[in-house]
Amino acid sequence: MTNVRRREVAAALAAGLAGAGPLRALAQAQTQAQAQAQMDWPTRPVKLIVPFAPGGATDIVARLLAERMQALWKQPVLIDYKPGGGTMVGTQFVATSPPDGYTLGMAITAHMINPALQPKLPYDTVRDLAGVSQLALGHFGLFAHPSFPAANVAELVAYVKKNPGKVSYATPGVGTGTHLAGEMLNHMAGLDMVHVPYKGSAPAQQDVIGGRVPLLFDVLFSSMPFVKDGRLKVLALSSPKRAAANPEIPLIAEAVPGFSAMSVIGVIAPSGVPAELRRRIGADIARGVRSPELNERMVALGMEPVGSSADAYDGLIRAEIEKWAGVVKRAGIKLD
């Protein structure tokens, strides 16, 4: 290499090194700014997406949570309704929002069922979203018309096995957690019950009360009033543990070991939210759920408050996705 060429290379290297200094300084400043933003969070209103129209249990819980978090965060928590697509519309909005902690979303059991049931989800539930905190656990109940000959799950199993394909169960719709609970019971107990889907709990309840369908899988608090007035009887719960408010109701798992199907409600965020910030938000929400005021009001709605860590809820989401995928595949469930 000539002396002239060596001088040119040296000059180029020097210029490059000189330019690298400002770039490093800029990157360092950006990192510091991001860290400071996380420490200061929240400095403006937080949006909480509800993937349903106003009204219903999810909306009520969201409002209770928003009220509690506003007091803690000293910033407004704004409820934003984005119904449609079996919670997909609202969930997609959360998945594509800036990952800064200012957009959170409400999620129910459908959040864990949709990956198996909806082949064309506009987002990847595991890759694009992350759990922030599980708020509560709800119970699915197996109800029956008072004239149904079985008084418990063991008797139900024996009766259905003697009458394969002749016993039907109603649910609020295809692909709901209650529908999949019924299909799980079919699989685990070796039964052949026929699913009768409705568009919501009310019409399903009325047809079972009227004796047109003998069995009903529904959310516990939704159908318990009909048990209290004698129009239905409850055989068991599908949850892994008995309900705190109704400890007298047995579990399907007591007759069918390992059975577990529950209603889960929680808060999610875009997966890009820094882990430390997501955990801090989750801890704040968990603290709010465990407060006497919010705890008591959720129990009154028929839910069992949880208030989990972000990591625990995220792990539950992944486990439930895998479980429900197996149920959907075995039962061959497809949406029309």
Image (cartoon, helix red, strand yellow):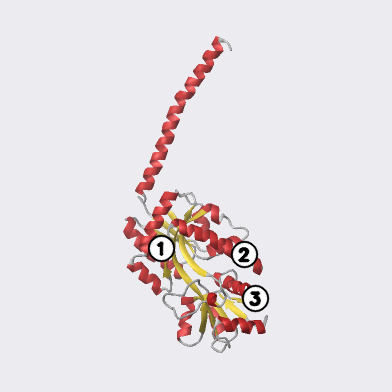
Q: Which of 225 and 96 is in front in this view?
A: 225
Residue at point 54% right, 52% down? Answer: 127
Label 1 environment density (alpha carbons within 10 Å; few <14, some 14–19, many ≥20):
many
For mark 3, what is the residue?
A: 190
Residue at point 47% right, 65% down? Answer: 265
Q: Residue 154, image x and y in percent?
A: 57, 82
For mark 1, what is the residue?
A: 307
Is any atom of residue 11 visible in this view?
yes
Where disc 2 sits, the SS reads: helix
Q: Nearer the viewer, residue 54 or 160?
A: 160
Disc 2 or 1, which lies upstream in sequence? 1
User: 317 above or below 228?
Assistant: above
Where disc 3 sits, the SS reads: loop
Is any atom of residue 173 visible in this view?
no
Type of amino acid at the residue the image marks with label 2: Gly
Q: In this view, does 113 lie to the left or right of 106?
A: right
Where disc 1 sits, the SS reads: loop
Label 2 environment density (alpha carbons within 10 Å; few <14, some 14–19, many ≥20):
some
For mark 2, what is the residue?
A: 326
User: 244 above or below 273?
Assistant: below
